[in-house]
Image (cartoon, grey):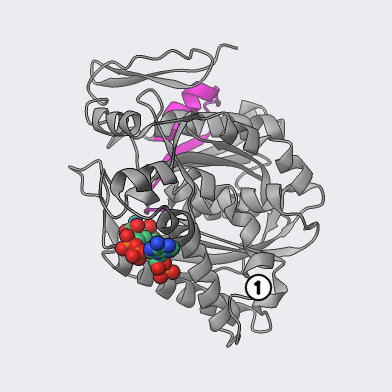
Amino acid sequence: MKVGIDALGVAVPSMCIDLEVLAKARGVDPLKYLDGLGTWRMGVAPLDEDTVTLAARAASMAMKSAQASPDEIGMLVVGTETAVDHSKPVSSFVQGLLGIGTRCRVFETKHACYGGTAALMMALDWIRSGSAQGKKALIVCSDIARYGLKTAGEPTQGAGAVALVVSANPRLVELDPSRTGQYASDVHDFWRPLYSKDAFVDGHYSVQCYLDAITGAYKHYKELEPTVTANDFAALAYHVPYGKMAKKAHRQLRALENDPAPDASFETQVAASLALPAQVGNIYTGSLYLALTSLLSTSARPLDGQRIGLFSYGSGSCAEFFSGTVVAGAQERVKALGLQAMLDARKKLSIDEYEAIMRAREEADVKPVETKAADDYRFLGVDSHKRTYVGPRA
Ligand SMILES: CC(C)(COP(=O)(O)OP(=O)(O)OC[C@H]1O[C@@H](n2cnc3c(N)ncnc32)[C@H](O)[C@@H]1OP(=O)(O)O)[C@@H](O)C(=O)NCCC(=O)NCCS
């Protein structure tokens, strides 16, 4: 039975900051951020945009692209590590904002940046088992990556969401859930205690944990299909906390096959997947799927019918290497979403505006929020301890 990604949607906040501006303000050589990390811009969410509004906007785009009606969705899962409530899931807010019907499994998954992949794998198995009874799954990965002002992680922040409509007879990527390599290990590389809005990270250790995870997951994948080599993939999309990490991941994967020039294939196999992430920053759960979107929308090469590899990593840790086949016409479908124009329309913040938003976020959970845009999904603030949202007028 075929199963995979039928349509996708992407949401970024309406504001961003140039990393060149940030570097100058921090007294850092801009080339460290632009080349050393491989990120040029990162999304910044103003107070009336959060994990819920980003998820709803991405989901709405994916549903329109799939031409799916709310009643066709039988499973709605939001993978996030920046949820807005300890109990009520982001997915319930999204259900309400999109008018998804009541005959649906609606819940949230968490495992750092791996939570969305956990949901995707569950959805694939749900469809393959027959439990879906012809319905589709809507999987949304939504996060605001926050390490705090003037920390080492500051240039690797970002915000955004990617939504995937998962179905039988997919029109974008047919996935192979029976052949996935897994790796999990109890490590303390990145975490966010319940009392903190900012994440804590042992930065250089987290890079090593990621590389250990790709080693373990790819070795497992190759045990399931011993004849496969990295050359069998037309392209590879990795989890992208920042572009350079994907480059390190690719080098590691190639080195596992004793490739004497492990960087030589980077331009052909990986570069297109980093075009959009370089302008958005880290979006945690959605990072791999933004890389996949970038590959499909910016690759100059036709990928129809070609096999691609995907690597998901969540600190803590859990990782998965899996693969799929690009469906004919997928690149045109994703290009038609107009994602570059969406990125270009963002307001570029000054350093003062960016820092003011970061500081004000501390209070946004307990106060009403001013919003100007009634034609989009927006957070209105907290009333009687309940978060309230508005969606675009029908
Ligand atoms: C990623 C992170 C560890 C970088 O930390 P850092 O100590 O500030 O940065 P580094 O000194 O390692 O420099 C980063 C890169 O820029 C390069 N660089 C430094 N100065 C440079 C310059 N002037 N010009 C060009 N490149 C430069 C470094 O050589 C390094 O590249 P390399 O990794 O290929 O050697 C930090 O931003 C972080 O903790 N981020 C959050 C955690 C994360 O994203 N983890 C990823 C795994 S999940």
**Apparent side of residue 242 relative to residue 168 in the rendered image (left or right):** left
Q: Is residue 184 visible?
A: no
Disc 1 secondary structure class? loop
Q: Residue at x 65, y 42 (%)?
A: 133
Give x and y (percent) for residue 81. Answer: 36, 46
Q: Residue at x 75, y 48 (%)?
A: 331
Give x and y (percent) for residue 207. Answer: 37, 67
Please say if 83 is above or below 113: above
Q: Is residue 216 visible?
A: yes
Give the residue number, with chain letter if any, for mark 1: 265
Q: Residue at x 40, y 41 (%)?
A: 21
The amino acid type, in three-letter code, at marker 1 is: Ser
**Apparent side of residue 311 relative to residue 199 in the rendered image (left or right):** right
Q: Nearer the viewer, residue 137 or 303?
A: 303
Q: Residues within 10 Å of mark 1 (few under 14, many from 20)?
A: some
Give x and y (percent) for residue 347. Answer: 48, 28
Q: Quadrant of ligand 1?
A: bottom left
Q: Nearer the viewer, residue 156 or 70?
A: 156
Magenta range is: 90-114
Quarter occupied by the C terminus: top right
Quarter occupied by the N terminus: bottom right
Give x and y (percent) for residue 259. Answer: 61, 85
**Apparent side of residue 306 relative to residue 117 in the rendered image (left or right):** right
- Residue 367 within the magenta-colored segment of the rendering: no
